[in-house]
Amino acid sequence: MPQITPQPGIMEIDLYVGGKSSIAGRDDVLKLSSNENPLGPSPVALDALVAAASGAHRYPSTDHAELRAAIGEVHGLDPERIICGVGSDEVLQFVCQAYAGPGDEIIHTEHGFSMYPILAHMAGATPIKVPERNRVVDVDLVLAAITDRTRVIFITNPGNPTGTILPDGALERLVAAVPEHVIVVLDGAYTEFADGHDGGVTLADTRPNVLMTRTFSKIYGLGGLRIGWGYGAKELIDVLNRIRQPFNLSVVQLAAGEAAVRDQDWVHECARLNADQRARLTGALRQLGIACDDSFGNFVLARFASEAEALAADAALQDDGIIVRRVGGYGFPEGLRITIGDEAMTGRVIAALNRWREGA
Ligand SMILES: *Cc1c(COP(=O)(O)O)cnc(C)c1O
């Protein structure tokens, strides 16, 4: 009897582990483990979400025209070159599925997002991990890893969990040197937190093989709703649309996303709060002798003297009801990634770390 057998690569997938969200016996938990917006979504987006719910018996738009138009207007982009997905994760999945298969290689970097190898395996392709240099993507090492079989390169910029950024010039150099049979995906999940960086828009505008992805999950505070988008050459977007399910986004997602992107005042306010509290937490960590790079995201990677010390700090934070992210799986056993909260939340983290240091 032939047995049922999954496609090549499927059994290589290690399930994605999300940020922890509860501590047994506590109801005052502060969750800073998934880079969520401490202020939540824009009130305007929430209103749109609720209003759209009464139309839930109707099928949603298949082409997302209104959401794409809103994104295009706000960002100054051609809506014809935008594709929307169930989180940006789905757009990343489209790229792997449409352009890579068994025998092909998909490059990601050492501390990159853990979804990349999962998506590569889903397509039956082989994920290739390239080292970073001092927690920053190394353009030359990425270029050196390219082979005839390379189909996709994932670059997270700003990086997660590193928080570091590849300057625009380095990105340009990378893209200019990549052969034309390779797609470069610039994952801009944290672009809005990186003042003065364009998230790869210029490169996606001018290069046929560059796709920029963005999300409503981080600064827009809509991670629970699952909305993301990508921007690239018309030909590339047309290919991705062929494997997109026609009703991938619900009426509620579409309405909330459109209202959220139009409320840029909210985005700016969130970015300002994040920058202030990020500087405050970075300063406090360094004062405590805990190393961290300047972060361009909505989190800071705290690097302790050892894995044991990181574990002890994590335990102390949890004793105070604070959940941060262990990042051993990202190559930082000595690290804890701490999402930036509002003023009170950040104060709580700093106070807990101070108490831990004093007690240690
Ligand atoms: C959070 C995050 C995303 C966004 O995922 P969604 O599917 O849009 O929620 C993408 N890439 C990175 C690196 C992230 O950290």
Image (cartoon, rainbow, N blue to C red):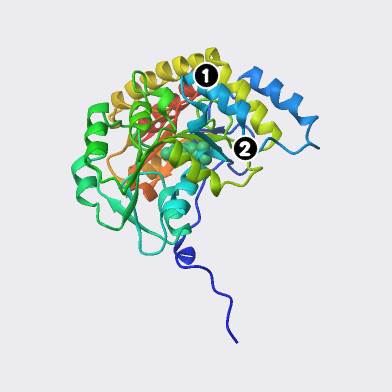
Query: In the figure, 355 relative to 7: above or below?
Result: above
Q: Is residue 18 left or right of residue 41?
A: left
The N terminus lies in which quarter of the figure?
Answer: bottom right
Query: In the figure, 269 relative to 114: above or below?
Result: above
Query: In the figure, 270 relative to 353: above or below?
Result: above
The C terminus lies in which quarter of the figure?
Answer: top left
Residue plotted at (40% across, 60% down): 125
Residue plotted at (46% across, 68% down): 8
**Residue lying at the far front of the rendered structure:** 235
Q: Quadrant of residue 192?
A: top left
The residue pinned by badge 2 equals 26
Residue labelled 1 has its Cβ within 8 Å of some atom of ligand 1 = no
Q: Residues within 10 Å of mark 1 (few under 14, many from 20)?
A: some
Residue plotted at (59% across, 37% down): 226
Percent across and percent down for residue 218 are 50, 30
**Residue lying at the far bottom of the rendered structure:** 1
Q: Label 2 vs label 1: CA separation?
A: 45 Å
Q: Secondary structure at mark 1?
A: helix
Percent across and percent down for residue 187 are 40, 37
Amino acid type at circle 1 is Glu
Q: Is residue 99 left or right of residue 244?
A: left
Percent across and percent down for residue 46 are 68, 23
The residue pinned by badge 1 equals 73
Q: Secondary structure at mark 2?
A: loop
Of the image marks 2 and 1, the number of the one nearer the N terminus = 2
Q: Quadrant of residue 183?
A: top left
Please state the total of marks drawn on the protein image: 2
Q: Residues within 10 Å of mark 2 (few under 14, many from 20)?
A: few
Q: Is residue 263 visible?
A: yes
Percent across and percent down for residue 348 are 49, 24
Q: Quadrant of residue 9?
A: bottom left
